[in-house]
Image (cartoon, rainbow, N blue to C red):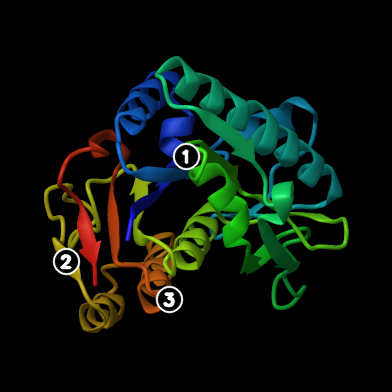
């Protein structure tokens, strides 16, 4: 089967114009078929503050009320998405920006209001592989933001790691699919205070041990859960690594 890389870019890169430029230049050199997924970093929070709307987060997850949804949609699906697409065109990578609503690519369901009401936040329900095949078969790289829809006209803000994992899983039936989750560290660390303590490989047994010992927590827990969900759904390989080493053999492999 043809190889496909689904790569999720970290917010730390989106917030840094020079780092974003470097990342996208490297991304453009990848010869395999590829899909890029992104969130919004801190740009959305800064934009909300400029508009007099207080950003609200719970355990690192954004509370998305109606006003916030309008802003994050404009920032994620507009400013950030089109900036990425324009930069990829600069480096010779023909790209098209998508939300989940475009081509009915991703349908999410609004998260239940209990135990925490996150507002207009969605959890991925279905991915339409045909939507992505349209672009892949034409040699076009889809750049997917973390705004989806519920199929009934409502936009929803969705976690970008989850979006990337769901796309990779949906495409694994037709492609030899690799999921790459990029963030600010070199990989998953055995000691969060030691950037050199990268764990080369993590299986489910080690993951459970790391959780018990408190070595992985907070934002790393859902990232690893998404990784294992992708493996269970048929994705060939999942790597968690630094955005700055996209084209290098590095990071943590999930198996």
Q: Where, quadrant-wise, is the N terminus in this rendering?
A: bottom left
Rounded to the nearest angstrom, the CA distance separating label 1 from label 3 is 26 Å
Q: Nearer the viewer, residue 87 or 33?
A: 33
Q: Is residue 50 left or right of residue 13?
A: right
Q: Is residue 217 left or right of residue 201?
A: right
N-term mark: 1 or 3: 1
Rounded to the nearest angstrom, the CA distance separating label 2 from label 3 is 19 Å
Q: Which mark is residue 201?
A: 2
Q: Is residue 20 above or below residue 241?
A: above
Q: Is residue 196 above or below residue 113?
A: above
Q: Position of residue 245 (x, y in %)?
A: 23, 37
Q: Position of residue 128 (x, y in %)?
A: 63, 62
Between circles 2 and 3, the one closer to the viewer is 3
Between circles 1 and 2, the one closer to the viewer is 2
Q: Residues within 10 Å of mark 2 (few under 14, many from 20)?
A: some
Q: Which mark is residue 120?
A: none
Q: Quadrant of residue 85?
A: top right
Rounded to the nearest angstrom, the CA distance separating label 1 from label 2 is 24 Å
Q: Secondary structure at mark 1?
A: helix
- Residue drawn 61% across and 26% down? 82
Residue denoted by label 1: 11
Residue denoted by label 3: 233
N-term mark: 2 or 3: 2
């Amino acid at each position: 089967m043809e190889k496909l890389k689904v790569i999720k870019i970290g917010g730390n890169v989106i917030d840094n114009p020079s780092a974003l430029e470097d990342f996208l230049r490297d991304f453009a050199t990848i010869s395999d078929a590829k899909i890029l997924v992104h969130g919004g970093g801190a740009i959305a929070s800064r934009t909300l503050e400029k508009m007099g709307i207080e950003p609200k987060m719970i355990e690192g997850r954004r509370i998305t009320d109606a006003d916030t949804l309008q802003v994050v949609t404009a920032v994620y699906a507009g400013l950030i998405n089109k900036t990425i697409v324009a930069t990829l065109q600069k480096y010779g990578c023909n790209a098209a920006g998508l939300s989940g609503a475009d081509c009915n690519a991703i349908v999410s369901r609004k998260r239940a209001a209990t135990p925490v009401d996150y507002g207009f936040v969605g959890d991925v329900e279905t991915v339409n592989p045909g939507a992505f095949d349209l672009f892949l078969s034409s040699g076009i790289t889809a750049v997917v933001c973390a705004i989806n829809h519920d199929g009934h006209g409502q936009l929803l803000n969705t976690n970008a790691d989850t979006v990337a994992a769901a796309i990779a899983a949906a495409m694994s039936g037709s492609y030899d699919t690799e999921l790459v989750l990029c963030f600010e560290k070199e990989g998953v660390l055995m000691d969060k205070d030691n950037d050199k303590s990268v764990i080369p490989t993590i299986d489910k047994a080690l993951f459970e041990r790391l959780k018990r010992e408190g070595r992985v927590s907070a934002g790393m827990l859902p990232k690893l859960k998404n990784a294992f969900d992708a493996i269970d759904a048929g994705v060939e390989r999942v790597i968690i690594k630094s955005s700055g080493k996209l084209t290098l053999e590095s990071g943590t492999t999930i198996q």
